[in-house]
Amino acid sequence: MKKLKIYDFDEVLKREDDAQSCKEIFVNDIRDKLDKYFEEGYPLGETSTIKKLDDNFRWRKGFLYCCSGYPQSGKSEIINYLMILRAKEYDEKILMYSPETNTYEFISNLVRAYIGKNVNPEFDNVCTKDEWNKGLDFINDHFAFLENRDEMPSIKTLIETYQRFYKKGYSCFIIDPLNWVVESNVGEVNMYQYLKLSLTTLKQFAKSTESIMIYVEHPKTPSPVKGKIPKATAFSLAGGTMHFNKVDCMIIMHRLTREDLEDKVSKGEILSKILDDNQENNINFVEFETVKMKSQRLNGTLGSRILQYDFITGQFK
């Protein structure tokens, strides 16, 4: 793989060389591959293995994904669980940069989601030592974790690390959240430039390596409207519309309140029996909303699905 060069804002503007020129492509240069697509069809995006999401969400290698939502909406939990499923289904390796979470706790939670049982003796349904070891072996074989040293990393140092792990066979890269990258402290005035270059860099890496790049970004602090917090949208993210402009797919997670659930029961979106039974068994309901998807015909149309999150197992269904 050709090494992807990362430059500061000023360096990008000053440079004038062949590396900045566009590569020229003609049909006959790639005709064989185009003929293959004609005969076999352009491949659909890959399933997350949560079947109810297939209509609205599929994985596509080379894509940049963004996941957002208010605190406690399940955005980190869904990404972590989707990575467990991706490792199981596609035997892929995942590099996690999640500096807000203690790594020991993080690994324990991934094991819990993998085996579908508690790993803490303070709770019921605790796994056996053999199950625990099986889970640790699986996480060790498919995941690696980045921790900060004395300072936060820059996009440049992260990409250099990603390139090193890509050569080791890693193909999914997570930043959770993006505001734990040093350039995110540039302030409101320079945020547009920071996001424009940083997100382009992440997208270029994903595209050039045929990897999946995912980052989590927090929404701005909402102001109540008539006493109620409005639903997060694609344009609620800190930094504005640049996220929506640059990413290939954006997901917004919503934690459903009792009022939300009762409204969905009245509309027939949730059966009242399912709601009552599950809430007695530590099940929360969240809404997984796809608000942007490139090539929707292949990768899923815009829309939302209600998922059940099990606090005991850390799994979604």
Image (cartoon, rainbow, N blue to C red):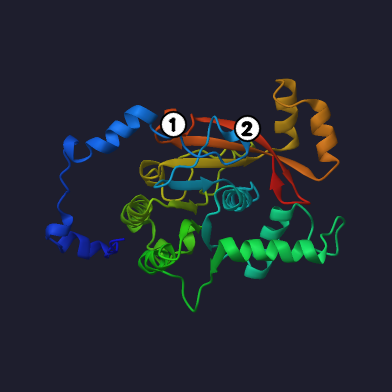
Q: Nearer the viewer, residue 124 or 13?
A: 124
Query: Residue 298, which numbered label?
Result: 1
Q: Position of residue 137 (x, y in %)?
A: 66, 65
Residue under circle 2?
52
Q: CA distance from mark 1 to mark 2?
A: 16 Å
Q: Quadrant of the C terminus?
A: top right
Q: Position of residue 80 (x, y in %)?
A: 60, 53
Q: Residue at x 29, y 61 (%)?
A: 4
N-term-proximal mark, 1 vs 2: 2
Dot 2 crowding, Cα within 10 Å, few <14, some 14–19, many 20+:
some
Q: Disc 1 residue type? A: Leu
Q: Secondary structure at mark 1?
A: helix
Q: Secondary structure at mark 2?
A: helix
Image marks 1 and 2: residues in contact by CB distance under 8 Å:
no
Q: Position of residue 270 (x, y in %)?
A: 73, 27
Inspect this view and state whether residue 55 appears: yes
